[in-house]
Amino acid sequence: MKAKLVKKLVAVSLVSAMAVSSLAGCGNGGSSDKDADKTTGKDGEQVLKVAAFNGGNGEQIWKDIAEAFEAENEGVKVELDISSELDQDLTKKIKNKDYPDVVYYNLGQPSGFTENMLKENAVADISDVFDDELKDKMLDGILDGTDAQPYGDGKVYLAPIFYTPTGLWYNKNLFEGDQKKYDLPTTWDEFFALGDQAKADGVSLFTFPTSGYLDSTVYTMLEQAGGMDFYNDALQYNADTWTSESGEKVLDTLGKLVSPEYTQEDTVANANADGGFKINQQNVIDGKALFMPNGNWVIAEMAASTPDDFEWGMMPAPKWDGDDTQAVYMFTEQMWVPKDAPNMDLAKEFVKFMYSDTVVDILLNNTTVDKETGKESAAPIVAPVKGAAEKLPDGTTKDVYASTTADDIVAVTGKLATTKPIEGLDVQKNIYGATESINTGDMTVDEWQKQLVETWEKCADNLEQ
Amino acid sequence: MNREKAQRRFIFGCLAPAVILMAIFIFYPTINVFKMSLFRMGAITNTSEFVGLSNFKTLMQDKNFLEAMQNTILIIVMVMIFTIVLAVLFAALLQRGKFKGKTFFRIVFYIPNILSIVVIGGIFGAIYDPSNGLLNTFLEAIHLDGLTHKWMGEPNIVIYSVIFALVWQAIGYYMVMYMSGMAAIPEDLYEAAALDGSSEIHTFFSVTLPLIWTNIRTTLTFYIISTINLSFLFVQIMTDGGPNGKTEVFLNYMYKQAYGNGAYGYGMAIGVVVFLFSFVLAAIVNKITDREVYEM
Amino acid sequence: MNKKKSGNIVGKGVIYIALIVLAITIIVPVAWVFMASFKKNSEFIGAGTNPWALPKQMFVQNYQVAFQDARMGEFLFNTILVTVLALLLILVIALPASYALSRFKFKGNKILNLLFMAGLFINVNYIVVPIFLMLSDWDSALGFQLFLDNRFMLALIYAATNLPFTVYLLSSYFRSLPKGFEEAAYIDGCGYFKTMVKIMIPMAKPSIITVLLFNFLTFWNEYIIAYTLMDEHGTIAMGLKNLMAVERTATNYGIMYAGLVIVMLPVLIFYICVQKKLTEGMTLGGLKG
């Protein structure tokens, strides 16, 4: 046994020495056909394995989509693997050479699972799914960002299947109607002035569920501060990102925002405790803090503890004086196909099917059921297909989607570009985790800037391709 | 001659199953950990590339790792000191003291040790919650508002919140160990001390403590081994190393690097360092506490 | 005389307070979990909730949901099966090994002792994935799945990974037994094996019970190995971890606490029944390499 493994490892290292540029595929030789017999089930029935992350959307939605797919493709059986710890389940399965065909798991999760698959070049190029017809149907620009083309090489690896505009969420009743207390700010100066005004009332300006939620804020601020080119360069780790005037503007403003001066005092403590993100969100409902970065999933997420007369609102991150537009961040959720998927063609069919009218309607009609009360509440999901958002029922969610097409709003997409694995580097911690240390006074904005410059340098050196 | 042969056969038969099992399920995987630490490996697919000692070189300059190391050492030292003092004290009280309810206390103190870490994580989540937690609401109720803290959020406090949970969990276990040591101390030694007019406190230092010294010394190694392990399980459930690395510990960082960051070989290098660290630390502690023991 | 007595009373008071404070920090949170498991979600979060308030109703539904979602019934059976198997295995393997190590002088004794000692330092957390990969390799060599997701295998690995500590405790106990027992038995014509089984092992009963209880708790609560190696045949601690992961995203606090109670309660009852035995056989030797 031991001898065999040594041999295998030596062989592997030889291969990688010959093809240094490609890390992928070395260890996959041989036994990947282990489950080949499983892919065609009884009576020549084809089995498609779909693995889906069980987040806030519930399981039913995947069962409905699977059923619809089976109805349209005769002889196909969809095998669902829905798990709230999908990253760990799939890591196990893939190590055991048992590959799913299609995976729904987002970028930006704490586990870094999708990022790791990308780092290991284990995700298939699915550009051919997006033919001209499908591209026409989809929202403009939604396939251009690094969250669809993680290597920035013009090829699509990640299919954006859902999208949500994100911004700063607040209690609408405080800013509109007969209980109106404050004016909605549009610039950072107004925003902080509002913070001072609110403080006099014993209310904090800002909170964040966990520091990871600040990503959309940071992305929009980068665009706001330096424009779209600056933003795109920043995602590709341009060395001047954080030392430029625009970068410094972002850091200074953010540093001020997360300081104890403006951020609700329990925020950091809750952000680190198990399930504490929800308490931070509750603080906006309870009026302890005015704004938090979030997306419209928060409505369903907090439904059980939201008073009936409460009304949510979302605004884009404020702009700086002299700017014409405000930015919202388009949060997309991704579906992808592993390189070793046993049924590659059928998997691509399934990805394409996600944009069909059938699925678009299933998504819009999604509901979640409260386990305790059994109460069903609408939790529509929107596919990045033209016209889908217009079909939403009237209300906050529809307004939020509609607001992103306004003239003075710029929609920003994308994520930091994918790098090779870098030992000892925690990018999320260096960007967002640092805000907690700034809040607690353990770190200054200057130190943060230094840390970010170093992080960007390391990432730039390790960009894929 | 025949007898010697039979004895050898018997010893072999007794030890073989245990040694074989350990070889397969403990030592062989450990050798693999050492081997993988020399590779650059993916976390999910089995891609790998030999990189020699490069992982270890990176590790020595890794600020996050050094912070995790500092935290782990602080946790080990604090847990050791607090647990020993409290466990020995309570063991002496329950073993030698004369008062009601001894059995009750013994039973209760051991409870944290029988609970799953997941359960303990849930319990401390409820205790430390900043606005609605048991601790802060209790302090407010008895008008000690000044003592309330963000137990999971203040960078200077959060590690002590973890340490408290670890000590809370460990006391009962070690108390029972020390009690069994004390039970073995012959009664006439106490009688002699009493005849000499020695106070109870003096007797504790002159009789009890020296005689359970071997016990305490043995448990020092246990503290090192189990605190490295438990601090990971606690941190994983309670804080995940936050805020911003303030409670990061060895093995949690290993997991984050191996899986979260996709640097599996690097994670294994951390595992190797942790193994060597605990071994060396135990050896050092064993050496400096090596003193003449009172044989009973 | 009088002075000493009043000093005693003060001393006793301090002692009692210290004991009671620690007892409270243990009893209150544990009892609180029981109480919380009957609360509805609306009693945990939002304005006007108080963690110390009694549940407004006995919301037993939390238990139903937790029991179903964490597949507790099925997992409970697996856990009992694996725990019993592992306890049997560890006794059968560790007893002879500890006996041979502690009562005989032979070539290699020192090295073997050191080996078992080294085993104490190897942390399950970093060898669990190599173990998984090894079993996965065995499976692919076989061509079908046998070693992974196998309850017997899990029990064997539990036994193997807890051997160092078990052997350590048992051999310390054997060492503490007076010399000369065996000689008398040999003179009576008993063989080595018979001497061990008939005379020495019964003498180690208190220590065996302690070892059994320790290992029972370890196996019952273990989830890292179980989670990595098992799939369909999960254990109860694994079920709880899954449940916590699901309910954490959904933050159904009541269900979470009900899950905690379901896992905690059997152990608590078992512990209260056997607590006396737990402390009897614990004898620690020095760490002698």
Image (cartoon, helix red, strand yellow):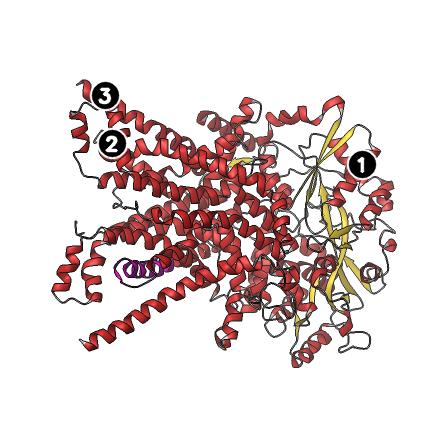
Amino acid type shown at disc 2: Ile
Q: Are labels 1 and 3 on one chain? A: no
Write down the region rendered in magenta.
Answer: B75-98
Q: Disc 1 vs disc 3: Cβ atoms closer than 8 Å?
A: no
Q: CA distance from mark 1 to mark 2?
A: 70 Å
Q: Position of residue A460 (x, y in %)?
A: 61, 50
The disc placed on residue C196 is: none
Q: Mark 2 packing: few (<14 Cα in 10 Å), some, or many (20+)?
A: some
Residue with the mark numbered 1? A69
Residue that numbered label 2 is attached to: C199
Chain of residue at mark 1: A
Q: Is residue A356 above or below residue A268?
A: above
Q: Nearer the viewer, residue C196 or A234?
A: C196
Amino acid type, mark 3: Ala
Q: Residue furthest top?
A: B2
What secondary structure is marked by label 2?
helix
* Residue A395 is inside the magenta segment: no
Q: Nearer the viewer, residue A290 or B58?
A: A290
Viewer can see residue A356:
no
Which residue position is annotated with label 3? B6
Q: Secondary structure at mark 1?
A: helix
How far apart are the alpha carbons under marks 1 and 3?
71 Å
Which mark's residue is nearer the viewer, 2 or 3? 2
Give the side of residue A332 with respect to residue B277, left or right. Answer: right
Q: Amino acid at mark 1?
A: Phe
Q: Residue A149 placed where, x, y %?
A: 72, 45
Which residue does the image show at 27% across and 50% down from the upper left? B286
B265 left or right, relative to C171: right
Q: Position of residue C108 (x, y in %)?
A: 25, 30
Q: Is residue A68 above or below residue A456?
A: above
User: Mark 2 belongs to which subunit?
Assistant: C
